[in-house]
Image (cartoon, coloured by chain):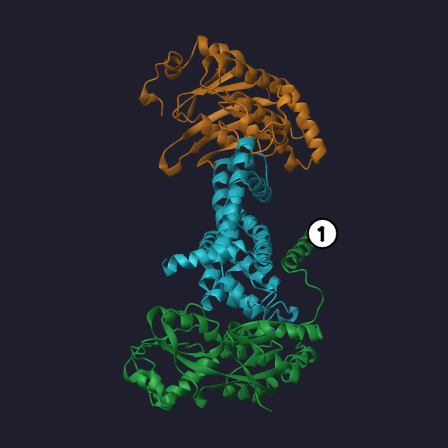
Chain colours: A orange, B cyan, C green
Amino acid sequence: MHIDDAILPLRIRGLSYRPNGRAVLAGLELELGIEGITLVLGANGSGKTMLLRAICGLIEPSAGRIEWGPAGEGGRPRAGVMMLFQHPMMLRSSVLDNVALGLRPLGVPAPERRRRAMAMLERIGLADRAGDSARQLSGGEQQRLALARAWLTGPRLLLLDEPTASLDPSATAEVERIVREIRTDGTRIVMVTHNLGQATRLGDDVIFMAAGRVCEHTPVQRFFSRPQSEEARLFIQGELPWHMRF
Amino acid sequence: MSAFAATFTDAVSLLVTFDHRVAEIVGLSLRVSGAAVVLGALIGLPLGACLAVARFPGKSVLTVLVNGLMGLPSVVVGVVVYLFLSRSGPLGEFGLLYTPPAMVVAQTLLVVPLMAAIARQVVDDAWQRYEEELRMLRFSWWRSVTTLLHDCRHSLLVALLAGLGRAMSEVGAVMIVGGNIDRATRVMTTAIALETSKGDLALAIALGIVLIFLILALNALAFGLRHWAIRRFG
Amino acid sequence: MAHALLNRLRVFTAAMLVAAAPAAGAAESIVLASTTSTEQSGLFGHILPVFEKATGITVKVVALGTGQALDVGRRGDADALLVHDRVAEDAFVAEGYGRYRRDVMYNDFVVIGPGADPAAVKGASDTPDAFGRIAGKAATFISRADKSGTHAAELRFWKAAGVEPVGQDWYKEAGAGMGPTLNMAAGVDAYTLSDRGTWANFKNRQSLAIVYEGDPKLFNPYGVILVNPDKHPHVKKAAAEQFIDWITSDAGREAIASYKLGGEQLFYPTPR
């Protein structure tokens, strides 16, 4: 299904981002394997969202590099990386049109776009809302729509920025079900969350960030049972002091 | 009764006896300004959206220029178009001077900067919100322009209305390039100017009332349409 | 594909331009550049339908000051001119912009002023005397100051009166057509010079009245000129000449003479 399989594994070496001199990412090191769901945890301002933005090329790092695929090629991210934002774009048109949107730059003809988008809506359980205005969906439904739109473009690596923030438990469960399905479909997922329960339910491994660095990158179970850094231990207990957050 | 009140009373009684000559003038006004707004929208809206979305050298200069041209006096546009369309001008061979198409050309030039400036503002707001997501979806800048224009279509009604208001109410440009020829290029504003210069203030005000009524009606229509769209599309 | 789109745009633009034009038949028409005084007096509304009925030719009148009308003719934007400034008309033909000029009609100028006539213009012996009285009392005078035929005539009268009005406090240069100038005069109770036709058709008079008239010096002749087809080949020579022949013919003279406003004849065909 994926044309360009060669973007994973992905290595990040010494990545720094210092807009106006303030270090948002500070010499970050990270390696992402070829499959699974990685959850990114950390306090507000620890650099989680910036990490995702750096990976998909929306910010220009001040130093360091990202190496793609087994050959470790540098440079800008290529096709196959997709990021989902916390407040996804909802155009003033139907649910179906909003999902089909992502296929337009790929040169898929309109009837085919609609057919594939409709099939996608069936998978995420929004088929009966296909003709409704996207802006009238609930928050959970809008997140599912955005996931469907991203999924439809067939990404190899999907970056999710707090897709379940401010969702109720059942909407959260629905989003998690879709995320799992996308992973099963063969897409590598990196997802920022504040929900520790979600990490245990969904994650294969956890990245814990503090002050623009990766403090820990371990399998989920180990992160919660035996956190290796003091920051992570305090974070899990909900007691990370202010001075250690940035 | 004061002379002032009498003028208005006469104006209203003239409206009651609305004859077909007035209807002809109103019809030409609507046709000329309507065509100018359609053409102006075809040029101005994409231009404004491009100014919001595209990156190119001289973009801020062009933005300032477009915003500045909004205040261009219609007489200046009229004179420039006159010089171009005059038989001695570069486009003289088409023989457009003193015809409705010449008026459409002048009014189009008049409304393009206005519509472009409004479109730039509206589309820029949407672009600020959606830029990264559209880039993620690998939308080219031109596809982003068309997508955002479509997404902002209800807000852009304001641009159409502003253009129509400016076109229908301007007198300087159509007077010069149209010539205010009876039964050929006489529109509401030039007719008002003529009646005023004949000292027939009642007829001038009667036409003015028609003009205001038309513009109000179009605004009400657009307001209703926008209201419906917000309910429908959010 | 881009080409096809461009083509469609071009067709659409043309369609919009055409849509704006009234659905007139292919009837022949000429553009006549003339003066605001003739247009606003209502003369054209009276005589042109007669001509149109006789020949099927529509005359589109663009009403400007005489100076502007001559400019329009010079640029080739009209087929014929009907104006009133003999000196400028002869120069126009001499410079080759006009093929020929013919006398058509005349009306006369009238001096307009406040009914109370503070400068006692009513008792003037002739036109220069009337203008001298206005200057002598420094009574407000509104000038067209728009290079029109009326403006040219006014300047001749000041010269004859030995007055240099430009720059004086009481002398206001409007830079406007006859109607707006009369509106200004009505607004500030000033004197001005008007052609009789515009005055007769002017409704917003307030306290204004004719304070001086009848002097042969106030004679105001109109001429018709064919724009030279050698200079501007697109000039509709045949149709324009048909109009010129008609307006100077018995039928045209009769139409001019029969135009009356409030029972008063405004224009007189030039005696043969």
Going by the image, does C58 lie left or right of C209? right
Quadrant of residue B71 within the rendered picture: bottom left
Q: Total marks drawn?
A: 1
C189 shown above or below B123: below
Q: Is residue B54 visible?
A: no
Amino acid type of the residue tagged 1 in the rendering: Ala
Q: Position of residue B167 (x, y in %)?
A: 52, 56
Quadrant of image for the C terminus of chain A: top left
Quadrant of image for the N terminus of chain A: top right
- Near-viewer residue (A154 or C145): C145
Q: Position of residue B190 (x, y in %)?
A: 51, 63
Mark 1 is surrounded, within 10 Å at the Cα level, by few (under 14), some (14 to 19) or many (20 or more) other residues, namely few
- Near-viewer residue (A109 or C191): C191
Q: Position of residue B56 (x, y in %)?
A: 51, 50
- Near-viewer residue (A24 or B204): B204
Q: Is residue C154 visible?
A: yes
Going by the image, does A113 lie left or right of A13? right
Q: Position of residue C11 (x, y in %)?
A: 69, 55
Which chain is indicated by disc 1? C
C9 shown above or below B77: above
The residue lying furthest to the top in this view is A225
Residue displayed at 60% across by 87% down: C102
C224 shown above or below A63: below
The residue indicated by pointer 1 is: C4
The residue lying furthest to the left in this view is C137
* Secondary structure under the numbered disc 1 in the rendered image: helix
